[in-house]
Amino acid sequence: MPQTMFDDEEGTLGMLRESVASFAEQNPGAKALRARRAAETDLDADLWRGMAEAGWLGLLLPEELGGSGLGLAEQAVLSETLGRSLLTEPLAQLVVFSSVLLKRVAESNARTALANGIADGSRIVSPVWQGSDAELSDVSAEPRPDGGYALSGSYHFVSAPHSATDFLAIARSPDGLILVSIDAAADGISVTARPTVDGSRLGHVTLKDVVVSASQVLAKGSAVQAALDEAIEVTRFALAAELAGIASRALEIAVAYTRDRVQFGKPIASFQAVQHRLVDMWGDAEFACAAVVNAADAARDETARATSLAILAAKARAGDAAVSVTRRAVHLHGAMGFTDECDIGLYLKRAINLNATLGQPEVLRLQFVALERAAA
Amino acid sequence: MAEPQQDWNTLPDEDFRRIFRDWVDANCPAELRFMRKQRPLFDEVAEWYHALANKGWLAPTWPQAYGGMGLNPAKHMIYVEEWARLGCPRIPDHGIGLTGPLLLQYGTDEQRAYYLPRILSGEHVWCQGYSEPNSGSDLASLKTSAVRDGDEFVVNGQKIWTTLAHCANWILLLVRTRKVEGKRQEGISVLLVDLRTPGVRIRPIPNLREEADFCEVFFDDVPVPAGNLVGEVDQGWTLAKSVLGHERIFLGAPTRPEYALARLETLAEATGKFEDKAFLSRYARHRLDVYDLGSAFERFAKVLRAGGDLEADVSVLKIFNTELYQRITEEMLEIAGEAARFEDDLDAGDTKVDAMNLFLDSRAPAIFGGSNEIQRNILAKAVLRLPG
């Protein structure tokens, strides 16, 4: 059955896979998703703590920042296995994104505190940077005499908006872009949230003259754009792996169901119309896994441009695969697939959310072509 | 006489690639590169065939003791990649890729000593006699019969879709030597048959491109020496099935879709189509399909490079590859607009694009080598283990 295939001479990746699988056995993803949905919260604090204890939240952070300094292959396996297990806490959106931003900025007390807090789970750091069109927001930062800024404006598509302890914010100042950390309880912040299709919540965070001190300013100028670009890229990579995991697992569930379900005296998986559908779903999931591995290989062996192309391709391929495989899997469950009690619909909803996060396939494909043709 | 060979497998990949590429680039005649015809006749590419034979590079996977290069699968992939990249023509290769490996694995010493050198010299040109009018996808139902009569088999029946039979002089024939109830795969044998034997008649069949590259072959009381049987009598199905090893990956190599995409790009550049947002969206899909096919190919290539064996799942590449090739050539006709109805090549700036030629060519690969529906049946059973 489809799975990413990496060299794993030391067995680290295998252990990581097993660790997520046993965590998921203790904490079934579908059950946690339904509980979080019923509680109308944006994050399951118990699960989050467990994930921190397992060491997954510091995976990409360097050791001097409290992490384990692992690379993209490890992140791929973690994200893929979370996807398979339907463990839907926003690890890619919060932790992967923030880890890359923090890795890219200069050393400071604020940076160390945030990174340590991310890795040990004591702080929930949510990156905020998107406007209502999902591009860079127009939140403005007025310089203050003490070297700090006052921020005003709105951020959209914010993960864990209520649970966040800190926001890692990008704003436009007269000094160019700035990256600052903001205490989520600071004066002038108001948060509203909307439910997402997969039982979580995304926020709209409005800032009115929110004051940050000079010590909270982590980076300024062109370094911020570079850090943001890389954070988007690596998060897309993690999402691609998670989507590939969703596609692979949804295929397995559909295979198991159609083998069990008997009509006309036979399992429906014995009918050729159903078999060819399942084979095509399997092929799509295999291609998604191969695209993720290709992106990790490119990041290790090739140029930054080649890596960018590979990640755009992987997110597009895995997003398409996850959404279309889960959609077909729902159909193959017949009326059962249309019930909320059956887990397969949750996979579909999760796939839709992640596929829409940081660029749908069409957008990514056009970016790929634009990047490739610009350099040609 | 062929040049002596070194141990290619111990060379670093990049060295082997460079040595092979440099020689091929210097020795494959320019007029044979990127031929319009997918399956040229023997005489059309004889010069290239003999050049390879003299160099000792005609049979990449045969052991060196038998005149081959003795390449392992990893080196063989490089051979095939460079061959395609340089646009070398396909040579009639059933002797190299089918009869040779079958005799190496199952033939007698006498058979190997007689047939293998004649394949390398080009004296024997082989074709593959498998499909019959009523036995295509359901190959095991084949009826062409071989009845033992003293020192001979007497063959009667008909083969069809026999590629390049009209330029071949030998055929590797699947025949029924025993009628069996139930398990039809039993009772099939493999015979080596000289096509110049009285009673053999060959009729080329023009294909959709109005070229004759496959044929009907009729057998009317054709005597075949008993010594031309390969392996055990009645066990031919297993033989024929086992001969395709790592070569199955090449059915999924992205070469054809890559080539078609490059032609599509030329046509689109020349006609300003890249300014058209609707086209750009469709183009981006094709481009990423080709790119991702490369990633999927690499997933299986890694298995071979690590010394592993391919399993049934590799045929996912064949399905994706052949259907993608079709989509890209369909796109060419789409953007050709009113000109899509012409049979000859389309103007594209200072060059021409053979859109119709490629469109028609792309109909075949999804059918041959086991149609894509048969591939899906196999995957359903062998990979997903779905009930029958």
Image (cartoon, rainbow, N blue to C red):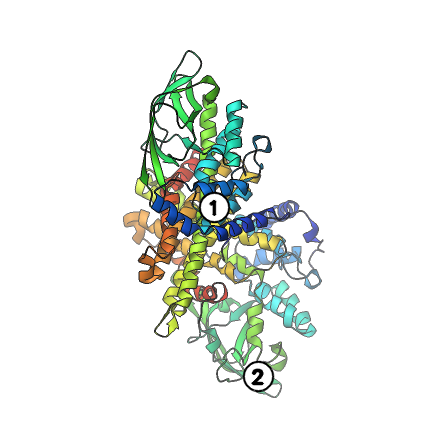
On the question of residue A351 being in view, the answer is: no
| Chain bearing mark 1 | A
Q: At 44% from the left edge and 60% from the top edge, which residue is drawn?
A: B365
| Residue named by callout 2 | B153
* Local SS, label 2: strand
State the image coordinates of residue B328 (x, y, percent, origin top left). 39, 51
| Crowd band around label 2 with a 10 angstrom C-alpha radius: few (<14), some (14–19), many (20+) | many
Q: At 46% from the left edge and 44% from the top edge, which residue is drawn?
A: A47
Both marks 1 and 2 on one chain: no
Q: At 47% from the left edge and 67% from the top edge, which residue is drawn?
A: B381
Q: At 33% from the left edge and 51% from the top edge, which residue is drawn?
A: B333
Label count reads: 2
State the image coordinates of residue B16 (x, y, percent, origin top left). 65, 48
| Crowd band around label 1 with a 10 angstrom C-alpha radius: few (<14), some (14–19), many (20+) | many
Quadrant location of the N terminus of chain B in the rendered image:
bottom right
| Proximity of marks 1 and 2: CB atoms separated by less than 8 Å | no
A158 vs B222, left or right, is left
| Chain bearing mark 2 | B
State the image coordinates of residue A99 (x, y, percent, origin top left). 50, 33
Asked which quadrant contains residue B114, the reply is: bottom right
Q: Residue furthest left?
A: B338
B266 vs B236, left or right, is left
- Depth check, mark 1 against mark 2: the one in front is 1
| Residue named by callout 1 | A241
* Local SS, label 1: helix
Foreground of the two, A374 or A180: A180
Q: Amino acid at mark 1?
A: Ala
Figure check: B187 above or below A318? below
State the image coordinates of residue A310 (x, y, percent, origin top left). 48, 41
Foreground of the two, B281 or B38: B281
